[in-house]
Image (tube, grey):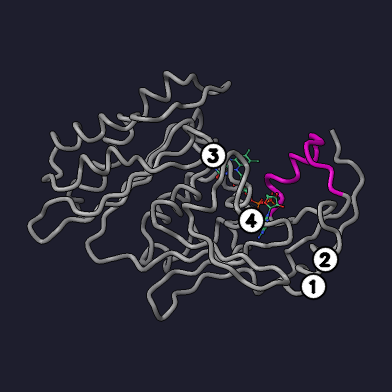
Amino acid sequence: MKPAPFDHVAPATLEEALALLVEHGENAKVLAGGQSLVPVMALRLATPAWLIDLNRIASLAGIRQLDTGELAIGALTRHAAVERSELVARANPLLASAMPWVAHTAIRNRGTVGGSLVHADPAAELPAVCLACDATLVAQSVRGRRAIAAAAFFRGMFETALGADELLVEIRFPAWPDGRRHGFIEIARRHGDFAICGIAATVERDRAGRVGDARVVAFGVVDRPVRLAAVERALAGTDGGEDALRSAAGAAADGLTPRADHHASAEYRSELLPVLARRALAQALTPRRR
Ligand SMILES: Cc1cc2nc3c(=O)[nH]c(=O)nc-3n(C[C@H](O)[C@H](O)[C@H](O)COP(=O)(O)OP(=O)(O)OC[C@H]3O[C@@H](n4cnc5c(N)ncnc54)[C@H](O)[C@@H]3O)c2cc1C
């Protein structure tokens, strides 16, 4: 199918884009990489009268480290730029590990970090990484800027806390503490397809070598990325050995009602959760060979 007719406008500045959002309101959609929006329009699931194209706004793209140690990524930064960034590899190894799993090479060349987060597909990798890292999503409108914690941003399937007149402009990841380790794993039919189930995890050990702060996030399972609190609790204070991992990961499906779709049944997702949680935690806790 072809999209319904629409008008296209490509502002050169963020201020112009924000004013256009107010002017066209519900009749407008923002265009970033177009990798999700264009198919949705072609299926006529979205029929905006106006497309506000962000691609001329250079200030919306870029990767930098702030004096605080935070990693700041502009919403219009392409997936491929994040994937290839040496700064990202140093400043947030979990994000770096997740990037090659985001779609296929051609899509990563065009798709943007902001587009993925606002699209809020429950099977997408980047929302899970944001939740695992306690990232802050910075929104801007003609009314000003506000910071939204990742835990509050993802509200459901394709639903976020972003207002109709707001743009996502930047994503900030807190500084990565020394000694924090990570694991990332997912199952999809083909590498690059959306995950049937995946786990993003970070783990820190205390001075005695016991597991301290652990964050374990599942994606592809319910309507948004979700922290596996029972796993995190069960792991804290243990030696992080094989038995502790297996026992903690066994709680991965506790309290969750996985969804069923044409990719996998709810039962299959329930079975994957403890297996993938254990493997992701093993990546994080097993000493790596140099
Ligand atoms: C075949 C295929 C496989 C894919 N597999 C995966 C996968 O495995 N994992 C994965 O994560 N993704 C996957 N994707 C999606 C891909 O990552 C997209 O790049 C991403 O979801 C959307 O990014 P975009 O820049 O193309 O956004 P667009 O398609 O341009 O926009 C998506 C939505 O976000 C809104 N939007 C975009 N930017 C902003 C902004 N700054 N502020 C406010 N609203 C904004 C748009 O209005 C639209 O509603 C796949 C896509 C395809 C076509």
**Could you tell me which residue is drawn at 17 percent across and 55 percent down?**
205
Give whichever of discs 3 and 1 has the lower sequence position.
Answer: 1
Question: What amino acid type should be assigned to the residue bearing mark 2?
Answer: Leu
- Closest to the observer, 184 or 289: 184
For marks 3 and 1, give the CA distance: 31 Å
Residue stretch in magenta: 33-48
Q: Kindly tell me whether mark 4's CB lies below 8 Å from ligand 1.
A: yes
Q: Please indicate, yes or no, whether residue 106 appears anywhere in the rendered image.
A: no
Q: Could you classify mark 2 by the number of other residues whose Cα lies within 10 Å: few (under 14), some (14-19), or many (20 or more)?
A: some
Q: Is residue 142 visible?
A: yes
Q: Which residue is mark 2?
A: 20
Q: Is residue 77 above or below residue 266?
A: below
**Cα distance in 3D space between marks 2 and 4:** 16 Å
Residue highlighted by disc 4: 162
- The amino acid type, in three-letter code, at marker 1 is Glu
| Residue carrying label 3 | 122
x, y (%) of residue 245? 19, 37
What is the C-alpha distance between the residues marked 1 and 4? Answer: 19 Å
- CB contact under 8 Å: marks 3 and 1: no
Q: Are marks 3 and 2 in contact (CB under 8 Å)?
A: no
Disc 1 secondary structure class: helix
> Where in the figure is residue 51, as x and y percent of width and height?
82, 55
Q: If you read the primary sequence from the N terminus, does the residue marked by circle 2 or circle 4 appear first?
A: 2
Judge depth for marks 3 and 4 and give the one in front.
Answer: 4
Residue labelled with disc 1: 16
The image quarter containing residue 250 is top left
Question: In the rendered view of the protein, which quadrant contains the C terminus?
Answer: bottom left
- Identify the residue at the far left of this view: 208
Going by the numbered disc 3, the residue's amino acid type is: Pro
When asked about the image quadrant of residue 212, the answer is bottom left
